[in-house]
Amino acid sequence: MEKLRTNRGLLKTILLSAITFGIYALVVYCHMSSEINKIASKYDNKHTMFYLWVCLLSGLTLGILPLVWIHKFCNRIDAEMTRRGIEHNFSSNTWWGWGFFGSLIIVGPFIFMYRLFKNFNALCANFNEKGE
């Protein structure tokens, strides 16, 4: 069985995204969109759209698609962590509170990304250890 990545980090993503003009962050989110499908689809019968498509279709939806995507993505992480019995404090409320409205205080999106990576790494580590 292929091991999922558990080494996502805020500082690494910020620095490598700056060097690659945002391509690194795009790749990270693309991997995460594929990995949540690998982890959860068997149980919730849902499919998270590949993040590259979200970016490409964003303009056609006047920026609404990425908001809907991240909301559903965060809820899916929350549901899967709950199903697996992993203690967490993460859901779409984390996105709306820190990622969206937190942008008014500038540091909010960074706090959101830190919490997203921390929880997703824990979910992937659990999947690597226990499997499906």
Image (cartoon, rainbow, N blue to C red):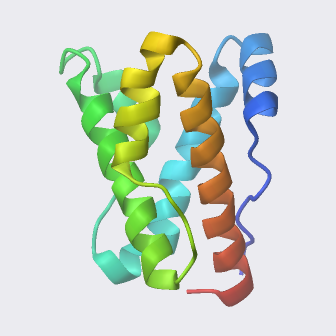
In the rendering, at what x and y percent does residue 14 appear?
73, 22
User: Seen from this angle, which residue lies furthest left?
Assistant: 61
The answer to whether any part of residue 3 appears in the image is yes
Please, is residue 61 above or below residue 50 in the view? above
What residue is shown at x 60% (from left), y 57% (from top)? 120
Please, is residue 49 above or below residue 75 in the view? above
| Residue 115 placement: quadrant | top right
Q: Quadrant of the N terminus?
A: bottom right
- Depth check, front residue: 114 or 35: 114
| Residue 123 placement: quadrant | bottom right
In the rendering, at what x and y percent does residue 20 appear?
74, 15
Q: State left or right for residue 122 relative to residue 102.
A: right
| Residue 50 placement: quadrant | top left
Q: Quadrant of the C terminus?
A: bottom right
- Depth check, front residue: 2 or 119: 119
- Depth check, front residue: 107 or 5: 107
Q: State left or right for residue 106 relative to residue 57.
A: right
Please, is residue 115 above or below residue 126 in the view? above
What residue is shown at x 44% (from left), y 76% (from top)? 82
What residue is shown at x 74% (from left), y 58% (from top)? 5
In the rendering, at what x and y percent does residue 11 appear?
80, 29
Q: State left or right for residue 113 relative to residue 53.
A: right
In the rendering, at what x and y percent does residue 19 appear?
80, 12
Numbered label tally: 0
What residue is shown at x 45% (from left), y 61% (from top)? 77
